[in-house]
Image: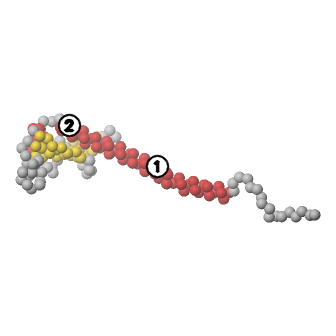
Amino acid sequence: MKMIHSHSSPVLQSGYSYVEVLIATVLVVVGIIPALDALQSGIQATDIHETSTIDQYAVQSKMEELLTLSYSSLKAAADAAGDYTIPTSFTDTYTTTDGRDIWREVFISAYDGDNADLDNDPFTGTDAGLLWVQVKKRDTVIRYETLVKQ
């Protein structure tokens, strides 16, 4: 009996082929790009949040400074400004801890707390002894408002 050796017998492979390594590399690269983009977005968001927090504290500190002043000082600044849309003399520029200058606008006006004139405008028909105080960072939404009573 003769043994016939077939050329089609399975050959055992060991290790990875070039194509398998290439496919694995492409899959890793395709997966890492979105991960790096997400990491970059997170780093940028941290910087933006830090800047916003510094700005918010700068505006808040100005409001706290104003609340230590007497009612007559605030009333005099409101009278000098003449209108709630005109910044008062308390408006200033503040240098933040990271070296930026921000413009803190201060608005003070007499206020209509009870709406006795029924016009729904808080700046007409004002109540004696009641002031509206607003501090804001120019050209942003960062602002603080309060009412001060004599």
Query: What's the CA distance linking mark 2 and mark 1?
Result: 39 Å
**Image position of 35 with respect to 8: above or below:** above
Earlier residue among tags 2 and 1: 1
Is residue 85 shown above or below 75?
Answer: below
Residue type indicated by callout 1: Leu
Residue sitting at x 35%, y 43%: 50
In this rendering, position of residue 28 left or right of residue 149: right
Residue 124, percent from left and from top:
8, 52
Q: Which residue is mark 2?
A: 65
Say what secondary structure mark 2 lies in.
helix
Measured along the vertical axis of the image, is residue 79 above or below residue 70?
below
Callout count: 2
Q: Is residue 78 visible?
A: no
Kindly identify which residue carries mark 1: 39
- Mark 2: which amino acid? Glu
Other residues around mark 2 within 10 Å, as few (<14) / some (14–19) / many (≥20): few
